[in-house]
Image: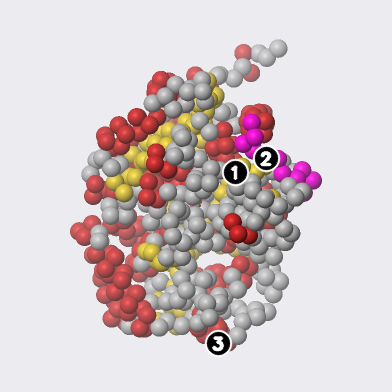
Amino acid sequence: MATAAHVLTPLAQLSRPVNDWVQAVRELTQPRAVYWCDGSEAQTRELTGLLLRNGELHALNPEHFPNCHLYRSTPNDVARVEHLTYICTRLQADAGPNNLWMDPQVAHQQMRALFRGCMRERTLYVIPYCMGPLDSPLARCGVEITDSPYVVLSMLIMTRAGRGALERIAREGRFVRGLHSTGELDPERRFIMHFPEELAIESYGSGYGGNALLGKKCHALRIASWQARSEGWLAEHMMIVGLQDPHGATHYLACAFPSACGKTNLAMLVPPASMPGWRVFTIGDDIAWLHPGPDGRLWAINPEAGFFGVAPGTNPQTNRNAYEMIRRDTLFTNVAVTKDDQPWWEGLSGTPALDWQGRPYDPANGPAAHPNSRFTVSVRRNPSYSPHTEDPSGVPISALVFGGRRREVAPLVYEARDWRHGVLVGAAMASETTAAAVGQVGVTRRDPMAMQPFCGYNFGDYWRHWLAMGPRLTRAPRIFHVNWFRRDAQGKFLWPGYGENLRVLAWMLGRCAGTAGAVETAIGRVPRPSDLNTQGLSISPEALQALLAVDPGLWRKEYAEVRQYLGRYGERLPPALLEELDHCEQQL
Ligand code: OXD
Ligand code: MN
């Protein structure tokens, strides 16, 4: 028999503020039952079994994909909904022109009407979670209430969820409150509301990752970016990777790219055979929380514990690590399946039998897998997993990298002259839209720091905060910009990408060490072809020349567009950014 010391306190009794909130939500939403998630394997098995029995989950081929499952979402609910995502601050100007805004009182009222009684006949799940290692002072906690067991299973992979998180909340007393219901999955009754001043999120009507796994975009970016400004750190849409050079030294980079532009692949890059001695270690693939350390360097943690990656394009040729990682214990969403129940998407060999909606595959219906189909898997499944992922103080960052998907204009890589110029480089980012959000794909839009959909406050204030961070770092990371997506006149990609990207990252580390050359241009420092390691790379000298070219005519036009864009931020725009832009234009 267990002694008193072994009897665990029921979760509901651990934190009075959490329990009070759960009871208030229970009254509002009227669920049939309340289920507290403790993060145990037993609960994961129980919920998986429930979803398999009710047909919401499908078991995949147990021989080739053990413990892997497929979830098919409602066809109208497959991506983030930026047009239904709001920042609700008392002052509209605090949300800024970069966000949709609603008055908090109006938003609460509207959401209460939606949530009232919405969980009748459903179970209310309480998920206490921690973003970041449980024992890290840089981590922050939240509680998500949801009526979707699929969301629970996903949150259990994507965050450190359960008893440990709730115990931390009980000690700290502070947590982000995230209330979610799938509602009727009606796009007309779908809203993702953020209340940064109250550390609260309310999401209704969608079960899709970025709209429903509230620890991810809603907490770790929109709410955390707000918290980070007041506490003196940065919450960024960045992956974190460690590169070990052939001498055995490891350096960490944090890279911001818009959604579905290759962060996951870059984070677990496989070095090309012609670069022996290099090793890659992954810390994170989507979000970085960056803190100035006592040594004047910038230190990063990955607040997440899992990957929610885009499936199409992932295969043993493009990324062996990523493909290896998702061969077991993985939750797939909206992929196709082969006739022997293996998950399938464009870019894999074999043929699909059923498409992402479960229909017999017919090319007339479009791609077999949804272009934004995903895998959800623990970071520990990654063959290049870095144990430093768990370091409470994070890893020191040597370089920050911004990047977009641009057919032209931006060269393969360039380096900012200094921190202030680097902030302009980030603020001036643009990229072609992808299937990660509802809307037209392939349209170039401004996406500063890859944070357009995720910054929880006015970009003008955000850039001011970025500028202020520089002087606090006596050993600030260097800042770079990359573009893997430049094309030739026929529309063909000029750069092979994937593992070959290591050549560009190695040049950056060379710049940090003072060993790699570059030429000064108006936009920053660009490598000459001879500054890049091209040994074993099959690329023509003309293609390399084109990749590194800076066309003054195109850049004049680009800077004019940047000026016009920045002008939208009026008096909140820090003058230093315009001075920096003047300087770049004069150099042209
Ligand atoms: C993501 C996104 O899912 O950026 O990471 O949309
Ligand atoms: Mn992302």
**C-alpha span from label 3 to label 1:** 46 Å
Secondary structure mainly formed by the magenta segment:
loop
Instruction: Please tell me in which quadrant of the rendered image residue 450 appears.
Output: bottom left
Q: Quadrant of the N terminus?
A: top right
Q: Is residue 299 visible?
A: no
Name the residue: 55% across, 83% down: 543
Residue 11's label in the rendered image is: none
Q: Is residue 91 left or right of residue 330?
A: left
Which region shows up in magenta? 54-64
Name the residue: 51% across, 53% down: 286
Q: Is residue 225 left or right of residue 507?
A: left
Tell which of 237 and 309 is nearer to you: 309
Dot 1 corresponds to which residue?
72
Label count reads 3
**C-alpha span from label 1 to label 2:** 9 Å
Name the residue: 72% across, 58% down: 351
Instruction: Please tell me in which quadrant of the rendered image residue 18 appears.
Output: top left
Q: With respect to residue 581, does 550 lie above or below?
A: below
**C-alpha span from label 2 to label 3:** 50 Å
Residue 58's label in the rendered image is: 2
The amino acid pointed to by label 2 is: His
- Labels 1 & 2 near each other (Cβ < 8 A): yes
Residue 542's label in the rendered image is: 3
Closer to the chain start, of discs 2 and 3, is: 2
Q: Position of residue 403 (x, y in %)?
A: 46, 66
Q: Position of residue 179 (x, y in %)?
A: 43, 33
Task: Tell me the element at label 3.
Answer: helix
Q: Residue furthest right?
A: 63
The amino acid pointed to by label 3 is: Glu
Q: With respect to residue 525, does 172 lie above or below?
A: above
